[in-house]
Image: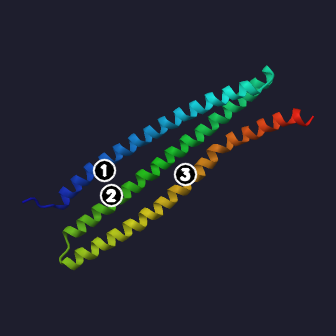
Amino acid sequence: MNQFTPKSLENVAAQAKEQYEGLVKAGQEQTVKQFEQTATAAKEQFEKTAAQLLKSYEDLQATGKANVEALIASSTIAAKGAEDLGREVVAYGQSALDKSITTGKALLTAKTIQEVVELQNDFLKSSFDAMLAETSRLQELTTKVTNEALAPLNARVTATVETFAKPLAA
């Protein structure tokens, strides 16, 4: 009959932590790769559209340079934000894992069924509350990063609209 000990629980937790960190890292790498592909496709499409709309080579050159700079700025902000989000997720996962280990150790030393039930209830409630709080915080951070990443592109769209509106108004 297998019995769990604090040491075996720690070994299982360490293995789970390694697997979790591997999954998070793979997810981060996939997210960055997908973002880079999207950014590349968006850049190519934007450059095609800009080439069709601009009438002179000088305007095309100046606008293209500004657009690429805005895209690079936007990509840099988004990549940094994705990295920060990934770190936050890993930190939360580590915290949850540590709390699970601590609770597991406490369960192994519980003297009564009532104590086991109380420990489990406390753990489940605090884990659920922490997950809700973390989800909300990550959603806010994601919104902030998205808005910051789109700001340089929005500025370029505004500048382009203003450039095309001037000849029409004249």
Residue sitting at the far top: 57
Dot 2 or dot 1, earlier in sequence: 1
- Dot 2 alpha-carbon crowd within 10 angstroms: few under 14, some 14 to 19, many 20 or more: some
Please name the amino acid that badge 1 sits on.
Lys
Query: What's the amino acid at mark 2?
Result: Leu
Q: Are marks 2 and 1 in contact (CB under 8 Å)?
A: yes
Q: Quadrant of the C terminus?
A: top right
Numbered badge on residue 142: 3
- What residue is shown at x 25% (from left), y 64% (from top)? 104
Which residue position is annotated with label 2?
97
Q: Is residue 151 left or right of residue 20?
A: right
Measuring from the top left, give residue 18's x and y in whole percent.
Answer: 30, 46
Which SS class for mark 2?
helix
- State the image quarter where residue 107 is shown: bottom left
Alpha-carbon neighbours of circle 3 within 10 Å: few (<14), some, or many (≥20)? some
Cα separation, mark 2 vs mark 1, equals 7 Å
Residue at screen point 46% across, 60% down: 134
What amino acid is at disc 3? Thr
Q: Which mark is residue 56?
A: none
Residue at 42% in and 54% down: 91
Q: Please tell me which of labels 2 and 3 falls first in the chain.
A: 2
Q: Is residue 98 above or below residue 145?
A: below
Q: Quadrant of residue 119?
A: bottom left
From the viewer's side, name the closer residue of 23 and 41.
Answer: 41
Residue at the spot of label 1: 17
Judge depth for marks 3 and 1 and give the one in front: 3
